[in-house]
Amino acid sequence: MTTLTDKVLLITGGASGIGRATVRRCAEKGATVIVADLNLDGAKAVADEVAAAGGTAHAVAVDVSDFAAVERAVQSAVDAFGRLDGIFNNAGIAGGKPLLDHDPERDYHPMIRIDQDGVYYGILAAARQFVKQGGGGVIVNTSSIYGEQAAELSFTYSAAKAAVISFTRSAAYELAEHGTRVLAITPGRANTAIIQQFPQHLRDLFASEQLRNVMTEPEEIANVVAFLFSEESNAMNGTVVNVDDGYSV
Ligand code: NAI
């Protein structure tokens, strides 16, 4: 059985959706989790859920588009628990406009700062901490099937998520000498707030595009991420793991 006993993990976007489910699952498996989110109240509520279930979690406010804030979140894990064993760079936003309607300051740069730069900052801050500790550590990044294919209204989102795949492979290559593994997941349609904002007929369409005819539940993705953080996946490095319910076959 996958165990994360004694691992200290930082999970961005931990207040909601895939992040929240992963916080809960990793804590169930024995990890101490730093729940990092722009929404501090939401992060605190998730940390309280973990504590009520007998686990250990600690909420911190972070804006992943701010490198200094990401460094502070990593440092808060070290201050509270002595070290960091893994980071899940998962916080993100979705949505978009047709390319010809773009205003770069509205439709490109802000999303790139969160979905792309935010993952780069998390990789860099965590990797520096891992090296300080003598190496090791696992980094998991949330990309998307849209990082691998074009889609409607996803020009900027696809660019950012493709960069996340590239970061994952390059960071795995560079950090292997320090014993650090770097992995990515590509969800398809996961049943979270990002999707719940769409009307029911579109949600039905999204579900029908996956082979099980349902949207993936965040807990199902959390199971995979917990496995990636565990030593059971030691043979995997630089790997992009589809958790898309067959959307991309
Ligand atoms: P969600 O909206 O439930 O969770 C996203 C979390 O990120 C929220 O708690 C939000 O407060 C936080 N966040 C947003 N901007 C932030 C920032 N600047 N700094 C720190 N935290 C910030 O959505 P979901 O679905 O759980 O999204 C998680 C990740 O999964 C995202 O990267 C998203 O792009 C990705 N994804 C989701 C899919 C889906 O179908 N739900 C499909 C493919 C990828």
Image (tube, rainbow, N blue to C red):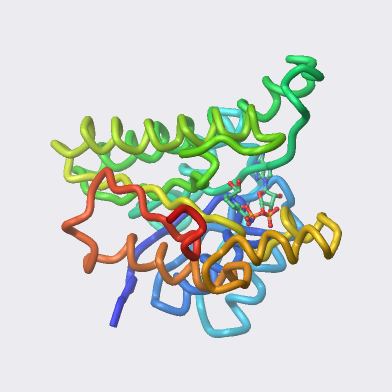
User: Taking 106 as reference, is 157 above or below it?
Assistant: below
Residue closest to the eye, 241 or 89: 241
Q: Quadrant of the C terminus?
A: bottom left
Residue closest to the eye, 226 or 246: 246
- At 72% from the left and 21% from the top, the residue drawn is 99
- At 54% from the left and 73% from the top, the residue drawn is 212
Question: Horizontal and vertical percent for residue 207?
Answer: 65, 66
In the displayed structure, does residue 237 sit left or right of residue 29?
Answer: left
- At 59% from the left and 71% from the top, the residue drawn is 217
User: Taking 59 as reference, is 38 above or below it?
Assistant: above
In the displayed structure, does residue 4 sit left or right of residue 187?
Answer: left
Query: Extreme right residue here?
Result: 199
Q: Quadrant of residue 204?
A: bottom right
Q: Quadrant of residue 190?
A: bottom right
Tally of numbered tags: 0
In the displayed structure, does residue 27 sit left or right of residue 5?
Answer: right
Residue closest to the eye, 168 or 150: 150
Question: Horizontal and vertical percent for residue 122?
Answer: 46, 38
Query: Extreme left residue here?
Result: 177
User: Taking 97 as reference, is 93 above or below it?
Assistant: below
Q: Quadrant of the N terminus?
A: bottom left
Question: Horizontal and vertical percent for residue 237?
Answer: 23, 48
Question: Horizontal and vertical percent for residue 178?
Answer: 17, 39
- At 61% from the left and 58% from the top, the residue drawn is 189
